[in-house]
Amino acid sequence: MSEAAVSMRHISKAFGKKVLANKDVDLDIYHGEILSLLGENGSGKTTLMNMLSGVYYPDEGEIFIDGKPVSIASPKDAYDLGIGMIHQHFKLIDVFTALENILIGLPKQNSEKKCRKEVEDICSRYGFELDLDKKIYDMSVSEKETLEIVKTLYRGADVLILDEPTAVLTPQEIRRLFEILRNMKDDGKAIVIITHKLNEVMEISDRITVLRKGENVGTVLKTETNEQQLTEMMVGEKVVLNIARDLVEDKAKRLEVKHLSVKNKEDKLVVDDISFDLYSGEILGIAGISGSGQKELLEAIMGLQKCEEGSSVIYNSTAHGVHELVGLSTKEIIQFGLHLAFVPEDRLGMGLVGNMGMTDNVMLKRYRKGSGPFLHRKQPEATAQKIKDELGVLTPDLDYPVRRLSGGNVQKILVGREINNKPTVLMTAYAVRGLDINTSYAIYNLLNEQKKKGVAVIYVGEDLDVLLALSDRIMVLCSGKLNGMLDGRSASKEEVGYLMTHLKEEA
Amino acid sequence: MGVSQIISWFVAAITFGTVIMYGCIGETINQKAGGLNLGVPGVMQIGGIASLACAFLYESSVSNPSPIVGMLLCLLSTLIASALAGLLYSFLTVTLKVNQNVTGLTLTIFGTGVANFFGGNMMKLSGGVGTISVAVTSSAFRAKLPFLFGRFGTVGSILFSHGWMVYVALIMAFLIQYFLNRTRTGLNLRAVGENPATADAAGINVTRYKYLASLTGSMICGLGGLFYVMDYIKGTWANDSAIEALGWLAVALVIFTSWKPKNATWGAYLFGLCYWAYIYIPMEISRFLAAKMKLQSATYMQNLYKMLPYIVTIVVLCAVSKRKKKENLAPSSLGQSYFREER
């Protein structure tokens, strides 16, 4: 094969001290081919490509363009070297027209007229359809994507990187995009697609590089591989985890979710007709690529999302009786004993107030129980002390701002508070996000204890090994749909990985 | 109400409007680049006191001061002083990424303090309250237009009995409008204000644009202060922070004009008409309205008239919020600092 358009050698990048996003990655990209970069969430695909497009700077390693070593310190450097990246979140300005979006930042020699002519040439050469005078806010997602590609090409990109280009497109639009990508490939452009959809990988790419936990697991030719092999490369060997999993007899149906649907702001279904039952004394694991509807599903149950018509969540407990939860306020749902502990990416965004201490944070969820206009601090203080002792939260003082504590301690407080409210249904999402092994185990044990007490637990997780070791049942979500319900004891990692990335055909 | 009354109402409105027109144009440039500078009143006071101090020193140190030299020195000192204020603002908000609201409000307080400090000391030097007068320099700013002044009847009296800075403000409004919407630099500047990350990715130096917008914007705001001191109050000074109220109106005017300087050309004068309405609305109307509202005295109406500019602003804000057209809304990243490394 001819010389590589781009070679990355021994690239490493860390965020903070703990999170290693890329570790000693080698990658080659050639002209006239489409390379797929495949991997789970957080496997470092986007980070790696961001180092090519100048968003991040590698901590270690070298980048060669056409054999020459280069340093890419800004997006502008990347453009000058002929590298263009189309980000998942489009970098377009809403109130500008398509042409204006192409013009910004260009040297003044490129007159508007000349630019328009050249852009039209590019469109006709590769088969784009684009109205240059349309404002961005009037455009569909697919039009915006087209504009991003045209913009990048106009700026002279020879190497195009597309970050999950198909995530928001309809099947027809995807087909159209692929046609254009093939045209560009035939024209000698080097194209990289970041994705986790296996069927698309098999359809469009020439070579596939798989990343796992920040490392390059291997590169294969499409003609010499199959989806099975790729899934195995993606999820890796099964790691045996020593998490206790007791079987609780005598289960009762707690939640009966029927035809639950939620639409997002763009009027797209993010939770699409999901039905399942949740029993007391079990941990139901939810697996899925991030953004497959996990958050919206849990929020819908808690009354934080508006459900579509026909959605129903029947709650049944000996203490509270039978209730339809859809339509009730979050306050009422909490009183029934449903609790949600959601750990967002920034950890403090939901659930806890960073500037408050433990006591105040505990009080946030129970101040209504006091009488009169004044706060009663005694009980919350005792509760906070109990959480601190039982979970081993390291804090100098109960009133020390939780913002200053380490992530593990913050999450212990969050989960501990929900458990302390004596839930009947406990929903946790990403409870071990960013935690080290020991602290993670502490949280798993907490959840297991709750399960044994007869609480119905939902565990949304990222790590498949943990899901497989902890859950009694595993529900797999894909693009907002329920894509499979597996038994936690017998399911294989490959099976879950396949369901996460592969939407079953409608029967 | 006679013709002469109407003429003087309009003349007063135009003079008043010019002060806030400068403030509005300057602040629009700043806001279009994403900087919400609530320090406009402070910058205007700094610009105003700089011109006064300059003229005061010049007139008291030269035995036979020339109006033209005084005028040029004033302009220069105002531009430098207000640019420094703008530099301070952009250093804090762009480089140090301090909260823009806090910085702006503090700049207003700071500007008021600076102006009153120097204003007070100059009063002592000149011999007491109300004794500062830089009539010579002020006359250069208030010189009427040759050929046009005194002609064309009523319309002429309204349009041509002002100092030159009134016309400069009008020309500037259209020039800045053209600059923002028809030039590539203007396009880049708006891109920075709408979405700095996008602008950055397109190779625009976001920091430089934000600094330059703040500097230029502040210099234009400063001219508003200069015009206030030299033309509006005719080269005198009172430590009453009267400029501050006008500064806030200038900020309101930016929203009123939906970030389009060309609208400031009539919006500013409309504010002026509203502001002076309490003096010029005839007594008969006030008596009639007062009777309708069962007020004891018709003079109470005047206090209600003084609210007019603010009521107009509120009404327009409500109307603007109803208008869904995105072009008429504030720049998307207005008031936010830009961090490149953010994920």
Image (cartoon, coloured by chain):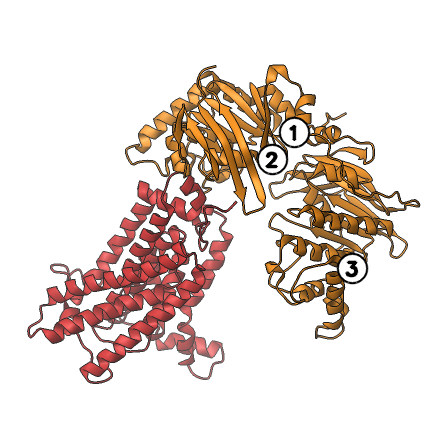
Chain colours: A orange, B red
Q: For label 1, count other residues whose C-alpha is less than 10 Å away and answer few (under 14), some (14-19) or many (20+).
A: many
Determine whether the residue tagged by mark 1 lies in a helix, strand or loop. Answer: helix
Determine whether the residue tagged by mark 2 lies in a helix, strand or loop. Answer: loop
Above or below, B131 relative to A422 = below
Q: CA distance from mark 3 to mark 1?
A: 38 Å
The residue drawn where x is 17% and y is 67% is B142
Label 2 marks a residue whose chain is A
- Determine which residue is flagged by label 2: A43
Q: For label 3, count other residues whose C-alpha is less than 10 Å away and answer few (under 14), some (14-19) or many (20+).
A: few
Relative image position of residue A273 (x, y in whole percent): 74, 37
Relative image position of residue A131 (x, y in whole percent): 44, 30
The residue drawn where x is 81% and y is 48% is A448
Tell me whether circle 2 and circle 1 mark residues in contact (CB < 8 Å).
yes
- Determine which residue is flagged by label 1: A234
Numbered-mark total: 3
Viewer-side label of 3, 2? 2
Q: Earlier in the sequence, mark 3 or mark 2?
A: 2
| Viewer-closest of A241 and A503 | A241
